[in-house]
Amino acid sequence: MLTAGFFLGLNSCCTKMFCLGFDDLNEIQLINFTAADVDSIAFEIFASNSNFANRIDSSFTSAHGRDAGDTELIIFMSEKITTSHDYKITLYSTGQIYKLTGFTARKEECNCPSDKYNVLDSY
């Protein structure tokens, strides 16, 4: 199962509380995988709504924990996820393919009425 994780916060104007937004997503958390499952990953970026035919970029990577010994495995991405792209993740060791597409986001208030951030609704 793939779950997106948000880990970069925004400062607010009122309480200085961190508000995690979709625009700040630059990593994907992998749940219920072993390190051997995610040691060889193809990460591809496609133009949105191209049915994964118009590839923009690709990279070969592996998932790692934040610190040595972490069981929470994360794919660190070189750029932030955007609604104008679709993403394909291929795990070579298991042959599994995951496609992330159809991102929708909504604006929510963060700390003060003038401080808004984008919340991931669905994908």
Image: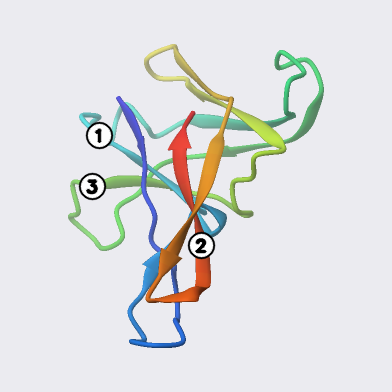
| Residues at circles 2 and 3 in contact by the CB criterion of under 8 Å | no
Tell me the quarter of the image containing the N terminus.
top left
Counting the numbered discs, the total is: 3
Query: Quarter of the image holding residue 70?
Result: bottom left
Q: Which mark is residue 72?
A: 3
Residue 12 placement (x, y as % from top left): 44, 81
Picture layout, residue 115 above or below residue 20: below
Position of residue 52 relative to residue 81, above or below, is: above
Q: Position of residue 35 (x, y in %)?
A: 27, 36
Q: Position of residue 109 (x, y in %)?
A: 43, 65
Q: Crowding near pointer 3: few (<14 within 10 Å), some, many (20+)?
A: some
Return the disc, 2 or 3, that comes first in the chain's sequence: 3
Local SS, label 1: loop
* Residue 16 figure quarter: bottom left
Residue in view at x 46 percent, y 43 percent: 120
- Residue 84 has which mark? none
Left-right relation of 66 to 77? left
> Residue 59: horizontal and vertical position, in percent?
65, 38
Q: Nearer the viewer, mark 2 or mark 3?
A: 2
Q: Nearer the viewer, residue 31 or 122?
A: 122
Seen in the image, is 111 located left or right of residue 58?
Answer: left
The residue wearing badge 2 is: 117
Name the residue that disc number 1 marks.
31
Label 2: element kind: strand
- Between marks 3 and 1, how big is the CA–CA gap? 7 Å
Q: Residue at x 33, y 79 (%)?
A: 17
Q: Tell which tag, 1 or 2, sits nearer the viewer.
A: 2
Quarter location, residue 121: top left
